[in-house]
Amino acid sequence: KAGVTQTPRYLIKTRGQQVTLSCSPISGHRSVSWYQQTPGQGLQFLFEYFSETQRNKGNFPGRFSGRQFSNSRSEMNVSTLELGDSALYLCASSSTAAGSNEQFFGPGTRLTVL
Amino acid sequence: AQSVTQLGSHVSVSEGALVLLRCNYSSSVPPYLFWYVQYPNQGLQLLLKYTTGATLVKGINGFEAEFKKSETSFHLTKPSAHMSDAAEYFCAVSDLRGQNFVFGPGTRLSVLP
């Protein structure tokens, strides 16, 4: 079974631009979560989508948004980029099957904002 | 709200020595507990998890962890460190639905030759 894939792997943007990151979960997984990882703040939860609906949300400004499609693929968008948005963005998928409760992570998208 | 603390942001051990990475959680109800490992420029990989049953959990790469409810701890151990164990380790908790994951700040493990 293929793992979680994220595209692109690396991205360089300038302040004020917007960016869209993509995540394809493991086949059959309906939950997709997004995290921001920085050296100073560690892993911070952005939001989780399940069956195309946002189920949980972290404490991030409205510039950060996401969506999930009917095939469970998810995208996250960051508008009006700031220097502090430079981070590794990780996507994780999980199954709702009984006994399966861990999250499976993709390799991440490293975003650099100049 | 759940929280996770990991004592020591950086731990160094010699190759062949015992690895002990500490994790304590704060939760009104014993949650599900996880340890993940992250190698440079990669995502997180599950090492092991505790949900129910035996409190000593064995994972991949020779790691194991013990859930101690009375101490609200889930420390990770490995009897003999290998150079390939050098990575960042994250302890995490979730609720009993497998949702609302909270990660600890991580511990960077260095293995010295």
Image (cartoon, grey):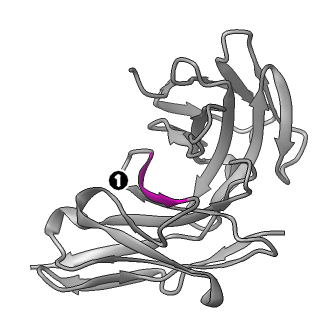
The overriding secondary structure of the stretch rendered in magenta is strand
Identity, as a three-letter code, of the amino acid under mark 1: Pro
Tell me the quarter of the image containing the C terminus of chain A: top right
**Front position in the image: A1 or B83:** A1
Residue A16 shows up from this direction: no
Return the residue at label 1. B40
Residue at point 43% right, 27% down? A3
Residue at point 72% right, 29% down? A76
Q: Is B18 situated left or right of B37 in this image? A: left
Vertical comparison of A66 with B8: above or below: above
Q: Is B65 situated left or right of B91 in this image? A: left
Q: Residue furthest top?
A: A70
Q: Residue furthest right?
A: A62
Tell me the SS state at disc 1: loop
Vertical comparison of B68 with B1: above or below: below
Q: Residue furthest bottom?
A: B71
Residue A64 percent across, percent down from the top left:
81, 37
Residue A9 shows up from this direction: yes
Residue A19 percent across, percent down from the top left:
69, 27
User: In terms of image quadrants, where is residue A66?
Assistant: top right
Q: Chain of mark 1?
A: B
Residue at point 44% right, 45% down? B43
> Does the magenta portion include B48?
yes
User: In terms of image quadrants, where is residue B86?
Assistant: bottom left
Vertical comparison of A71 with B74: above or below: above
Chain part drawn in magenta: B44-50
> Does the magenta portion include A15?
no
Residue B13 percent across, percent down from the top left:
23, 85
